[in-house]
Amino acid sequence: MAINVPPQRVAVTGASGLLGRALVTALAARGHTVTGGYRELPPPLSAAVTPLKLDLLKAESIAGFVGTARPDCVIHAAALTDVDRCEQNSELARAGNATSVQFLMKALAGAGCRIILLSTDYVFDGKDGPYDESAVPNPINVYGRTKLAAEEVVKNASAVSVIVRSASFLGIGAYGRPTWAEKLVTTMLEHPPLRAAIDQRSNITPIEFLAAAIADIVETRLTGLYHVAGKEILSRYEFALKLARLFGQGDDAIQAVSYRDLNRPAPRPLNGGLATRFPLRTPQIPLDVALVRWKTQFEQARS
Ligand SMILES: NC(=O)c1ccc[n+]([C@@H]2O[C@H](COP(=O)([O-])OP(=O)(O)OC[C@H]3O[C@@H](n4cnc5c(N)ncnc54)[C@H](OP(=O)(O)O)[C@@H]3O)[C@@H](O)[C@H]2O)c1
């Protein structure tokens, strides 16, 4: 699609990740010059996207990435996103999610480049969500604390910045790495019943919508903090029931449990989610419509 704003040089970190892949695709389709930073697995091959190796744990690698891409805008989507793994290795989580952002801001100092940082609803404690942008964060796990630390680094730096908080992405994984929603379906179909927490709530965010909304932000002069997430806030149990009906299963394919019964290493914000008032140029489609599209992608990925 042709754009009616000047094309920009946009560097996306985590271009092999769920959001990163959607972002490089959306930005390239809008005519921007895109560099996709990846650690091991290159982003989708496209003449419009230049892949560039990047190790978040090394300051010199980040400096080299910025120096080679010479971006007008960096979208920092790379992170250690496995919440339970972060809980079990807090040093690595801090290095990957927070110290790396210090390196990035240092590399960007004086470059006149805008940064868009991806953050999460997990910066909140989940006592009384959904939360708007004025709510005070109080993370209850290592992942949330390291993401909040990254927000602080960006806020205190001199670069023009946007922080986008989002929640529970709905998409299809690549490189044999299924997303959490794909894992739910696989368990439901192969080892029913699927145990799903009735007391853990968040927005479900279709990934193409989020990528389009962030591409819109790239094309504006916005600064500050924004909650951008799917409109519908569901418990994991309610979401799993939707999946069961979508895949022709009875409701008995899902078993309601409490989050505590799942015995996960990291606590989660339970009554969480984000209130989203951000005025979007890209309209949201209803979750049920997004889910029908997602099911097609899920089946294609397995065929
Ligand atoms: N997933 C969600 O539901 C969710 C919700 C709210 C906010 N977020 C935030 O949104 C952003 C994107 O999340 P996502 O789920 O799309 O991520 P993802 O699929 O887990 O991908 C993470 C990306 O970060 C890269 N990465 C990890 N460690 C790295 C390192 N040391 N050096 C360079 N790259 C490294 C990974 O590279 P490899 O592929 O090589 O490992 C991958 O490209 C993150 O900031 C996350 O905190 C996610």
Image (cartoon, rainbow, N blue to C red):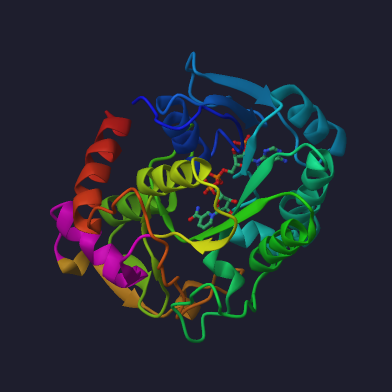
The answer to which of 147 and 276 lies nearer the viewer is: 276
The quadrant of the image that shows the C terminus is top left
The image shows residue 215 at horizontal and vertical percentages of 46, 41
Give the side of residue 30 with respect to residue 105, left or right. left
Q: Is residue 41 visible?
A: no
Tell how many labels. 0
The answer to which of 274 and 296 lies nearer the viewer is: 274
Q: In this picture, which residue range is highlighted in magenta?
A: 230-250
Residue drawn 17% across the image and 54% down it: 246
Residue drawn 46% across the image and 61% down it: 167
Give the side of residue 107 with respect to residue 238, left or right. right
The image shows residue 172 at horizontal and vertical percentages of 38, 41
- Tell me if residue 27 comes above or below residue 92 in the rendering: above
The answer to which of 266 and 111 lies nearer the viewer is: 111
Give the side of residue 242 with respect to residue 159, left or right. left
In the picture, residue 94 is in which quadrant? bottom right
Taking the magenta stretch, the answer to whether it contains residue 269 is no
The quadrant of the image that shows the N terminus is top left
In the picture, residue 284 is in which quadrant? bottom left
The image shows residue 250 at horizontal and vertical percentages of 14, 63
- Tell me if residue 209 comes above or below residue 135 in the rendering: above
Extreme top residue here? Answer: 47
The image shows residue 252 at horizontal and vertical percentages of 19, 69
Residue drawn 77% across the image and 53% down it: 92
Residue drawn 17% across the image and 68% down it: 251
- Tell me if residue 268 comes above or below residue 245 in the rendering: below
Q: Is residue 302 visible?
A: yes
Taking the magenta stretch, the answer to whether it contains residue 231 is yes
